[in-house]
Image: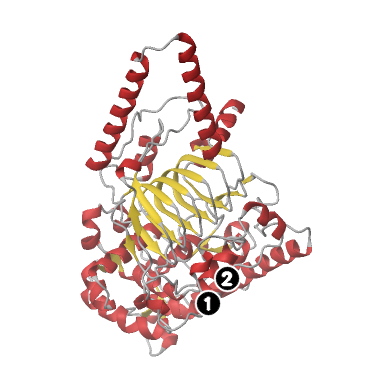
Amino acid sequence: MIEDQDLVDQSPPPSAPDPNPNSVIHPRRVSFEHGLLPIQKLVFADPIQTLAPVKQKLADSASDNNRVGSDAIADALGISGEHARLVLETLGSVLHSESDPLVRAKPEEVDSVGADLRDLVLFLYVQSYKKLLPRTHKDSAAVADVWPSTSAFDGYLSALSPIQLVRSNSRRFMPSQADDEAHQLSYLQKHLANIISLLAEPGEGEGEESLVLSMEAFEHLGFLVQFGDKGSDVSPLSQATPFFANSDPDMPAVPVPASQVHDWLLQNIASALESITERISGKENGPSNASDQDDAMSDACAVPNKVAPSDRGPCLIEGVSKTSLVKQASDLRGRSVKVVNCHDSVIYLLAPLRYATVHGCSDTTIVVGAVGKALKVEHCERVHVIAAAKRVCIANCRECVFFLGVNQRPLIVGDNHKLQVAPYNTYYSHLGEHMSEVGVEPSINKWDKPLTLGAVDPHDSLSHPAGVADAQAESAACVDPDQFINFLIPNWFSGEEIGSTKDNPFPLPDPYMAAQQRNLKNLEETRRSLRETPLEENRKKELSSALHVYFKDWLYASGNIRQLYCLQGD
């Protein structure tokens, strides 16, 4: 509460946003891409009317440092303790401040450490966000070359099923970075007044005109927006404003009228939207591309196997087909990665990553080194994902197998069919270092404890038949231990420094370890039997030739022959 109205900064907002590129406003994409939960009780038709009393109830139970634990969240929202824990884990994976206690909390501390009330309220508000619907791909012929035209599962769904519509469209076209950013900025533009009112405090006087925003409260808007280059280290949000920039760190900054902050942010958002619209319009009127990525995310589907590097955003790997692709730490360290519309390939991302997304891939094996925030796999078919990650979300996938070293329960949402999960099954020499760098703990692996949520995503923009929203997603089965095998990563870069990891850092559960030992024993017995069988020299040659033929047939049938060619090429 401000005691002296004269202390409130009444200076007018600048007439126009600073044209400096570092002052351009962007939505924090991870909050929209990795921070949405398909829990019906978190999706409010009128967020401000619902959240105001919820915020008050949470505030009444908050600790002295304004933090709220899982028990208070469960009580205020009427959700289970399990879902309240999920809210905290999800929020922790997308928070803008790396120094927040929730980000640094050990698994056993999450419930008690809780979340800052202001971050939690913003997180709950954006659960009302509706994702941008995918559009039909401009180059349908190029897509047809990669994607099978039908799936055996298509007959399981009604011809009018909105889930099938989403899958059919999304596997052909993922909205571009520019489209998504414009959609997210438009959402923020529409809801900005409500969002600021949830962070504001009453000043002198009455009514909304008296609301003020402190610098500390303003910083929490960093959960939703940022200034400067996307993907780079950004300075505190307050330093991009004319209100709080260059404030004396030894003196509390003077709060600013909420209306002034609102008008200034609206001005910046309008300017950014105008720029994005011009960029999209220019591309649509120019040569036809497979996807309208922004300048940093150039089209990577028109040219097969193209990787779009970017200093401003995630590294985009798109349209890889019938090959092997390797990216290592020097390419990706500390970055986020998106693997989109890849087919019949093996992709190695052997690096410490913040976020990773696998979207619309089929018949592909993807090895993801170490993901410190969140890995999302969506709209994939017959894909094998091998990943060490703090958090994994699986959505709308079919006949996929996930070999996981994961610190939190894998989240399974949407319309899934015949998923399987198994313990982590590989290593490479720098894996241990990469896991340590991003904070993945090898002693905790919850691969076999998936948490299923709704079969319908309330954040899509489609209408759903009555009752469908309450359906639960199909869970995943555990891979039979006798079918479990290790995955060997080739030594792609033999001339480089070798790391210290010599084995799988995640301990195997007893049934899988026993199955491996049986398989090794059977292999040794087969080898000994072959060595000790008395055969004439010509019969030995015939046996050796037969084994080579069968092995070669397996290489071709499994597609692994391609990896040998790639190794030869390297």
In front of the other: 406 or 522: 522
Residue 465, position in %: x, y? 47, 82
Instruction: Report the side of 42 relative to 222 (left or right).
Output: left
Instruction: Report the side of 412 relative to 225 (left or right).
Output: left
Q: Is residue 525 above or below residue 25?
A: above
Residue 89, position in %: x, y? 32, 60
In front of the other: 102 or 463: 463
The disc at residue 133 is 2
Give the structural element (helix, strand or loop) at label 1: loop
In front of the other: 473 or 537: 537
Q: Which of the two labelled residues, at mark 1 and mark 2, occupies the earlier sequence position?
A: 2
Outermost residue, bottom direction?
206
The disc at residue 487 is none
Give the quarter of the image for residue 207.
Answer: bottom left
Q: Does the residue at mark 1 contact the one at mark 2 (Cβ under 8 Å)? A: yes
Kindly identify the amino acid type of the residue bearing the numbered disc 2.
Leu
Instruction: Report the side of 434 relative to 57 (left or right).
Output: right
Kindly identify the amino acid type of the residue bearing the numbered disc 1.
Leu
Would you name the residue on which mark 1 appears?
462
Mark 1 to mark 2 CA distance (whole Å): 8 Å
Residue 13, position in %: x, y? 55, 74
Give the quarter of the image for residue 528.
Answer: top left
Q: Examine the rendering and report whether any part of residue 495 can be seen.
A: no
The quadrant of the rendering that contains the N terminus is bottom left
